[in-house]
Amino acid sequence: MLKIGCHLSSSKGFLAMGETAVSIGANTFQFVTRNPRGGSAKPLNLKDVERYLEFAETHKIGTVLAHAPYTLNACAQKEDLRDFAYCTVQDDLHRLSYFPEAMYNFHPGSHVGQGEEKGISLIADLLNRILEEDYKTTILLETMAGKGSEIGRSFEELESIIDKVEKKQQLGVCLDTCHVYDGGYDIVGNLDAVLAEFDEIIGLCRLKAVHLNDSMNPMGSHKDRHAKIGGGSIGVNAFAAIINHPYLRKLPFYLETPNELPGYQQEIELLKRTEIKYNDLKLIDDNMPVLEKAEAEEVEIKAKYEGYIKLQMAQVEKVRKLENKLLPEDLDYLNLKGISLEARQKLDKFKPHSIGQASRISGISPADVSVLLIYLEQRR
Ligand code: FE
Ligand code: FE
Ligand code: ZN
């Protein structure tokens, strides 16, 4: 099932956010940890947290995404600003320890004229200091549009940060569709190639969340102006491809589009309608009698995305088959795939950095590796 939500105001507390999310058809949400200027946060209301956690369990609200204040700059020139960023992140992570399923999203920072190299090393310093403290929350670096002196405008820049961090296992990446498109990555014309590049440089295993935003500007413009879904240069078809992509479809998606709640609700409905129901693939297969029985609206939408759906069919079908094989609990998936014990030990030992690398080590195809990694993670 599609994990989808939007950015919500945290002013009324956690339970209120959970209730709002459910009321607009979302099953996750994002919020800013404190006022956007990064000042002190209200003390945590533990009663509210407790009630939220109960609510979240009942309503199956999965991973939520806490967004660090936008004004933090881990690579500011002045030491007191960097200290402020460190103290804020520290306090945020302390609060998030009450939320076992939350992740923490973080803009790497702006080097403000000190140069990329300096910026990258200051950001890595902050992360190394923070991660020494053994917080459980996964920290996500967001892909940035490259406005001004923003770090994180390319996959290479994000990887150079990750590379300098010791406890890498707690680091992930959040891909913002508006930002990467602004950064010059063609997610509209060639999503597969962009994901392959991400995998080669950072590793798709690190990709933990996606921000869904259309862009007011053309590819490569580095402007960072979000548009409503379908109201910008990215377009609905590209979003349908993104949420259904075999490598992405299990991730949580967060809308940060210029909307009030009713607008978010509409976008969530739109995206849900474009979701390929993997178990209903017969509907769009050559099984016409089933298709005729489908509701008129369903048919219309499927027709609209027919081109895309056909293109993805082979890949989708493959993933679905593998998933079906994973269902029985005692199934030894690895044996089934003919993966030797040796290949498995290699994977365990080398903790592959990317799906491409895992594929080379184990000798199985990248698509199979992505399913395998999900499987191994569940087994842990
Ligand atoms: Fe952000
Ligand atoms: Fe974003
Ligand atoms: Zn943005």
Image: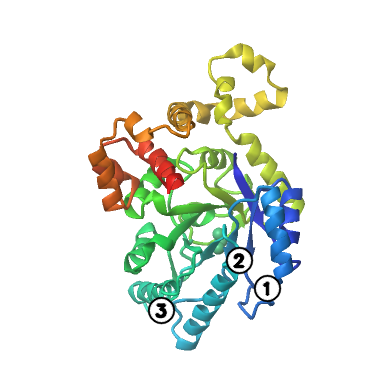
**Pick the front one: 148 or 157:** 157
For marks 1 and 2, the one nearer the N-term is 1
Spatial separation of the CA atoms under disc 2 and disc 3: 38 Å
Circle 2: element type? loop
Above or below, 356 against 117 in this view is: above
**Pick the front one: 128 or 284:** 128
Q: Image point 35% across, 61% down: which residue?
A: 159
| Residue hosting label 1 | 44
Q: Image point 76% across, 66% down: which residue?
A: 12
Q: Quadrant of residue 280?
A: top right
For marks 3 and 1, the one nearer the N-term is 1
Amino acid, disc 1: Leu
Amino acid, disc 2: Tyr
Amino acid, disc 3: Gly
Label 3 beta carbon within 8 A of ligand 3: no
Above or below, 137 against 42 in this view is: above
The disc placed on residue 113 is: 3
User: Where residue 240 appears, x then y in whole percent?
Assistant: 56, 38
For marks 2 and 3, the one nearer the N-term is 2
Quarter of the image containing the N terminus?
A: top right
The disc placed on residue 98 is: 2
**Pick the front one: 297 or 39:** 39
